[in-house]
């Protein structure tokens, strides 16, 4: 989240929320098939140790393990062991829910009041933020910025903060969308307001560990990276991408990235080799920043900028020296391939509307906003759609989740488990 101060009033009537999405961090959270945070184990929508997946699907798509109705919202699905966690809405209430991963049955759910506003109606009311699992706790943030810590086994509330009431935070025009990230004994998330654009809360009791800076927040989610042996918090703000010390919140570096309405929505992607990829729609584009270490300081150096790929609220994945992502906002969308080191566009292909994706077993699994699911092989020479089906309805903005060989999907009505083995 981060909208430039100058654009805050414009944003309230012009910005699209949803599953704002994308990528990354090489900091390991959990191994195996658990998916405990936005973007998966490494926050980059890549499954490094994926089991073998089917090379082709049946004509009607992967076999369905189960399906059930769920309320509105764009929060993605978390997996830990035999349980799933996500959020949804029914009228003026939002729910954090725990499900049986094998059956979809409800284990527990907790309801919080979350008044629906007309501004939320244009693209759906959310919730859009994906919860975060750390140890015995799960943390969720509602559309109206109610931050809640639950015991993940039974759903009992351990602590909560109403961020607008307690800290004067301003709820974004279409609702809050950023997903929190864990660092040591804290969770860190955008809050907004003077001196508190980012805030670190103690996981155990919700006490503030630090709050810093005046950058405008947007719907993007922060990431953690390991740069030259130092852990940094990277956040996409309304007019820049910034790096902080996650222990203290001190600013390490910043680099401009301007967008109409301050609408930098997609999550930055750390490529693991000192490069950060950021992309935005709204008359913006993509850029790669190289983080150069000079003594104790980090200097951001722009390698390239291009308007040829513009990620709206989706994500990208990296294979070798190339990034693969859906480019487009309110017009035609393309699935594109771009060289991460040079910005050279290798290709872009039509055939899907705006899409999210993940990478596993050398394959790209793509879900577009119309509910089309596809299995894709891609390289710098082109892409080949191996299998394609339609398991969901429009608007399917929630990014897919893969645990082992089970793919979890949701749209604004239904949640499904598909077998990819």
Image (cartoon, helix red, strand yellow):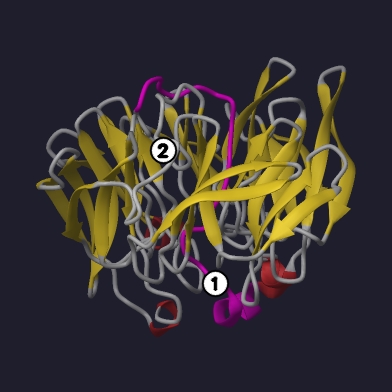
Image quadrant holding the C terminus, namely top left
Residue 338 higher or lower than 14, as above or below: above
Give the number of the disc on residue 37.
Answer: 2
* Whether label 2 touches label 1, CB < 8 Å: no
Q: Position of residue 348 (x, y in %)?
A: 73, 58
Name the residue at 77% across, 53% down. 347
In-front residue for pair 30/15: 30
Q: Is residue 180 left or right of residue 243?
A: left
Residue 90 higher or lower than 186, as above or below: below
Q: Position of residue 134 (x, y in %)?
A: 34, 29
Task: Write the start and end of the magenta stretch as one range.
Answer: 8-33
In-front residue for pair 42/176: 42
Q: Secondary structure at mark 2?
A: loop
Q: Is residue 316 visible?
A: yes
Magenta stretch containing residue 22, yes or no? yes
Q: Is residue 196 visible?
A: no
Image quadrant holding the N terminus, namely bottom right
Q: Secondary structure at mark 1?
A: loop
Dot 1, how many residues are within 10 Å of its Cα: few (below 14), some (14-19), or many (20+)? many
Q: Quadrant of residue 212?
A: top right
Residue sticking out furthest to the front = 59
Magenta stretch containing residue 399, yes or no? no
CA gap between label 2 and label 1 equals 22 Å
Q: Is residue 104 left or right of residue 138?
A: left
Give the number of the disc on residue 110.
Answer: none
* Mark 2 or mark 1, earlier in chain: 1
Q: Quadrant of residue 151?
A: top left
Name the residue at 64% across, 80% down. 10
Q: Which residue is mark 1?
A: 16
């Amino acid at each position: 989240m981060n909208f430039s101060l100058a654009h805050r009033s414009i944003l309230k009537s012009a910005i699209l929320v949803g599953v704002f999405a994308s990528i990354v961090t090489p900091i390991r959270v959990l191994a195996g098939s658990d998916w405990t945070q936005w973007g998966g184990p490494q926050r980059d929508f890549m499954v490094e140790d994926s089991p073998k997946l089917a090379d082709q699907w049946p004509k009607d798509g992967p076999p369905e393990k189960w399906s059930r109705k769920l309320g509105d919202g764009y929060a993605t699905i978390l997996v830990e062991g035999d349980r799933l966690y996500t959020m949804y809405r029914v009228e003026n209430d939002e729910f954090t829910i725990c499900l049986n991963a094998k059956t979809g049955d409800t284990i527990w759910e907790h309801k919080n009041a979350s008044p629906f506003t007309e501004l939320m109606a244009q693209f759906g009311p959310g919730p859009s933020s994906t919860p975060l699992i750390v140890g015995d706790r799960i943390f969720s943030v509602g559309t109206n910025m109610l931050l809640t810590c639950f015991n993940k086994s039974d759903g009992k509330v351990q602590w909560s903060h109403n961020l607008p009431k307690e800290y004067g935070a301003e709820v974004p025009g279409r609702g809050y969308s950023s997903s929190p990230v864990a660092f040591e004994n804290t969770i860190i998330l955008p809050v907004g307001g003077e001196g508190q654009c980012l805030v670190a809360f103690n996981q155990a009791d919700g006490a503030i560990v630090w709050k810093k800076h005046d950058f405008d927040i947007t719907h993007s989610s922060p990431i953690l990276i390991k740069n030259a042996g130092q852990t940094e918090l990277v956040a996409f703000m309304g007019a820049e991408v910034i790096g902080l010390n996650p222990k203290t919140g001190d600013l390490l570096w910043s680099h401009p990235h301007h967008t109409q309405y301050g609408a930098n929505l997609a999550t930055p992607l750390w490529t693991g080799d000192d490069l950060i990829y950021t992309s935005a729609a709204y008359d913006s584009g993509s850029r790669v920043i190289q983080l150069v270490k000079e003594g104790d300081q980090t200097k951001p150096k722009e390698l390239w900028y291009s308007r040829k790929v513009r990620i709206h609220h989706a994500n990208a994945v990296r294979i070798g020296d190339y990034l693969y992502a859906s480019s487009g906002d309110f017009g035609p969308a393309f699935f594109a391939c771009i060289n991460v080191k040079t910005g050279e566009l290798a290709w872009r292909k039509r055939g899907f509307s705006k899409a999210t994706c993940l990478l596993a077993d050398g394959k790209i699994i793509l879900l577009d906003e119309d509910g089309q699911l596809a299995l894709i092989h891609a390289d710098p020479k082109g892409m080949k759609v191996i299998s394609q089906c339609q398991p969901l309805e429009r608007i399917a903005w929630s990014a897919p989740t893969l645990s082992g060989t089970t793919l979890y999907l949701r749209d604004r009505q239904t949640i499904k488990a598909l077998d990819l083995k």
